[in-house]
Image (tube, rainbow, N blue to C red):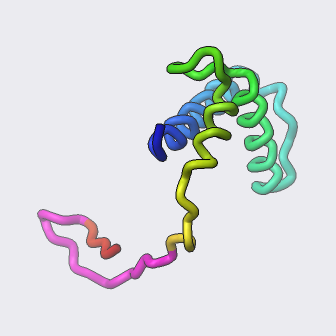
């Protein structure tokens, strides 16, 4: 399983998070900051990964598969910070111009 598997896990966790947020909105604690919300979300995702079975390998949890996959991922040498904003005219064929 490759890097796409980790992205699928993250998407699945985000979907579960939103479903649970809607279902139990009244029971959620108030967050004092965005960082507190992010920390709470990370805890919820990690707890879910410990319990949820993987779709392809039901004998393993999502956390087990993710841990195994992370040992084989290539390290990221640096974070992406190469965005360049340029003024441009809008045309009828292209509403945005991005150079990566």
Q: Is residue 62 above or below residue 68?
A: above
Measuring from the top left, give residue 8's x and y in whole percent: 50, 36
Q: Is residue 67 left or right of residue 73?
A: right
Depth check: 65 or 11 in front? 65
Indicate yes or no whether the magenta region holds residue 69. Answer: no
Q: What is the residue that sits farthest to the left in this orientation?
A: 93
Residue displayed at 87% across by 36% down: 29
Residue displayed at 62% across by 32% down: 65
Q: Is residue 80 above or below residue 45?
A: below
Indicate yes or no whether the magenta region holds residue 82. Answer: yes
Q: Is residue 3 above or below residue 96?
A: above
Give the number of callouts.
0
Q: What is the residue that sits farthest to the top in this orientation?
A: 58
**Majority secondary structure of the magenta segment?**
loop
Q: Is residue 53 left or right of residue 77?
A: right
Q: What is the residue that sits farthest to the bottom in this orientation?
A: 87
Residue displayed at 65% across by 22% down: 60
Q: Which picture quadrant has residue 58?
A: top right
Q: Is residue 63 left or right of residue 33?
A: left
Q: Which picture quadrant has residue 61?
A: top right
Measuring from the top left, give residue 18's x and y in whole percent: 62, 32
Q: Which quadrant of the rendered structure holds the C terminus?
A: bottom left
Q: Is residue 92 above or below residue 38?
A: below
Q: Which residues are magenta?
A: 81-95
Measuring from the top left, give residue 1's x and y in whole percent: 47, 37
């Amino acid at each position: 399983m490759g890097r796409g598997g980790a992205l699928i896990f993250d998407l699945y966790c985000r979907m579960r998070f939103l479903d649970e947020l809607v279902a139990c909105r009244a029971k959620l604690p108030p967050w004092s900051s965005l960082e507190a919300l992010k920390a709470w979300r990370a805890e919820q995702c990690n707890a879910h990964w410990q319990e949820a079975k993987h779709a392809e390998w039901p004998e393993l949890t999502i956390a087990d598969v993710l841990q195994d996959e992370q040992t084989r991922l290539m390290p990221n040498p640096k974070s992406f910070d190469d965005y360049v904003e340029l003024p441009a005219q809008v045309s009828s064929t292209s509403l945005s111009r991005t150079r990566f």
